[in-house]
Structures are given as C-alpha cells and as structure tokens.
Image: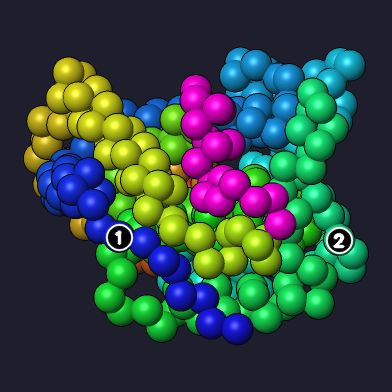
Amino acid sequence: MIFKPNYRITQEILECLTKIEMIKNSFRDSKISPVLLASLKSSAKIETIHYSTKIEGNRLTRKEVEQIIFKRKVIENRIRDSSEVKSYYKAMNYIEKCLAQNLPFSEKLIKKTHDLVEGVRSPYRDGQNAIYDNASGDIVYLPPETKDVPALMNSLIDFVNNDKQTPRVIVAGLVHYQFVTIHPYYDGNGRTARLLTSFLMRKYGYGLKDIYSLEEYYANDLAGYYSAPATHPHHNYYEGRKNADLTGWIEYFVRGVADVFEKIQVRTQTTNFRKDFSDEMRQLDVTQRKILELFTEFQEVSSMQIAEYLGMSQQSARLLANRWVSDGFMIISNYSKKARKYRLAERFEELV
C-alpha cells in the first residue's frame, strides 16, 4: 500500500502557509529571556496536556493539571483523569527527548509514544473498531480492517520519510489525518496523533520555541475538529476516506496553525519578550543559555539532569559540566561523586 494523499493547494492554504513561514522566520533568531522562555514553555506544556486530554473527555481543570504535573498531586475522585494526565506528560517528555536526539519518524517512536499515552504496552488492534455517535449510537466511522493496519502504518511512515515535495506543515497535518483515519489502536489514537503532529512540527522547525499549543485551538472548536476529518459522507473507510479529497482537512489544519502562530506573535510583541542582554548573557554560548532554562526550575542540578535536558549521554554531560565549572559558569555545590550537584556561579544567578 502506498499513501498518496489527494488534495489541492488552494488560495487559503497558500496564504496560511505564507503567514506561518513569515512568523516562523521572525522567531528563528529571537533573543529571549531564559526566565520568560521557561515560563512560556511551561504554560504551553500545561495547556497542551489539559486541552489534548480534555478533547477525549478528561474533566480536570487547567489548574488541576498543573498541580498534578508540578506538585505531583492526585485529584480526589479523579484518579483515572489524573493518571491520564501523568501518562500524557510522560509521552510529551519522550517526544522532547526524541527531538533532542534528532531521531526519525519511525514505528518505534509511534508505538512508544502510544504506550506512554496509554500507560501500558499495547500492539496495533487485533480486531475491528468503530466510532459511534454519542446521541444516536449510529456508526460515524468504520476504520480499515485489522489485516490492513500494519501496511497502512508503514506506508504513512514511508511517506513522511521519503516525500520531498510536500510542504512540511502539510506533512504534519496529513500525519494527523491519516493516523486517526487508520485508527491503529483501540484507544489513545487522538492523543497519539496530536503528539506525533507536534513532533513533526517541531522537527521541521515550526516549534516557535515550544511556546504554543495547537490542542487549545482544537478544543475551542470541537465541532470543527471532529467534522474536518470527515472528508467523505460514507462511514466505511473503503467506501470513503481511502481516496477522499483532503483539501478541506488541510485548509482546516493550516488555518489553525496560522491562527495560533499569529496569536503567539501578538502576545510576544505586547510583553517584555526580548530581554536586554547583559554583559553576562553575551558571554554565554547557545548551550549555556539553554541550560539557564533548567536553572529556572532547580537551584541545583546533576549531570544526569543536564544530560536529559540537552539530549546527550551522561558522560558527555559530566565533561560539559566540568568545563563550565572551569570557565566559571557553574560551581560545584555537592562534591559527592555519587550525588554531585552544580549551581550557577553567583554572577550568573541574576539571569534566572
């Protein structure tokens, strides 16, 4: 099976892609306060988790999600919802590690992401599933047969890794569409699709420093989000979505990206987004500026934390930390070999 999406580049799609590209480029060389960047990234992560799980029926508020993630609190009478949020958080962290390591889009990445979303290891479905209308109980969509799922997934992966002509934003949108169309698992398809879309957007350079959430856009227009993939009136995959015209879905997707990007642009222009770089900040390289974000969360850090944050081996992180100590960027706060900790040198502490 070969995935050959059928769509047209309309005037709306072209205008949205142009807007997205312009905003992305404006963010590329932005000099941002590490403290503010860390705060915006943290907020975006909470919003992403909250809205992505809310779409699937999670009843927790944004504040409760924040308490679960950062204070490890379990909400009484919401044990299942709390567990779902924690699982999604783990899946997001895994995606971030894959990006840091520049890993490709692969079946291994897909399956691991889904396993983390669900909290258990689960293979592709071994039976037929269906999506039903909550009110009438009628079948809204009947996905492809079980026997076709592996081949369809492989064809999607091949498309992502081998296509060189499709605009990258559209590729991310097509992955979202095709994944929920194949519906390879009994549960967790929507959450996994959104995470994979985020992975590709960021991998292709459309992360905007990780300070936006497409999930909020979807959650605020659930009717549009649910109806956009319905590209054919027939509910059966083989009679409808298999060869459907995806132009409408792509218009919906790029419209959402452009809308979210534009709002982020306005927001950052009306706040103290770009910090006046002090002499201390000018002395730091890109990696040191990035690790400042970690110090906004922790006063002391270990080489393991540095390794995880920068996506490198612990040995490389130890060597890097030793060099930073020699350069006067950090000091050793705990000399124990088993539990060695580092903190910023006093003159750099004001940066966080």
Picture disc at residue 8: 1
Q: Quadrant of the C terminus?
A: top left
**Residue 224 painted magenta:** yes
Magenta segment: 219-236
Q: Relative to the observer, which residue lies in front, 202 or 209?
A: 202
Circle 2 residues within 10 Å: few <14, some 14–19, many ≥20: some
Disc 2 and disc 1 in contact, CB within 8 angstroms: no
Q: Relative to the observer, which residue lies in front, 150 or 332?
A: 150
Tell me residue 244's x, y (percent).
Answer: 50, 60
Tell me residue 265's x, y (percent).
Answer: 21, 31
**In the rendered image, which residue does mark 2 sit on?**
128
Task: Tell me if 299 is positioned left or right of 13 in this view.
Answer: right
Tell me residue 226's x, y (percent).
Answer: 58, 36
Q: Identify the secondary structure beneath mark 2.
A: loop
Q: Relative to the observer, which residue lies in front, 170 or 92?
A: 170
Is residue 101 visible in the rendered structure shown here? yes
- Quick one: label 2 or label 1, which is nearer the N terminus? 1
> Residue shown at 55%/27% (left/top)?
223
> Residue shown at 40%/28% (left/top)?
39
Task: Tell me if 119 is positioned left or right of 312 in this view.
Answer: right
Q: Identify the secondary structure beneath mark 1.
A: loop
Amino acid type assigned to the residue bearing label 1 in the image: Arg
> Residue shown at 37%/53% (left/top)?
247
Amino acid type assigned to the residue bearing label 2 in the image: Gln
Tell me residue 285's x, y (percent).
Answer: 21, 57
Task: Tell me if 236 is positioned left or right of 14 in this view.
Answer: right
Quarter of the figure with residue 294: top left
Task: Tell me if 212 is positioned left or right of 147 in this view.
Answer: left
Is residue 195 visible in the rendered structure shown here? no
**Residue 14 painted magenta:** no
Q: Quadrant of the N terminus?
A: bottom right
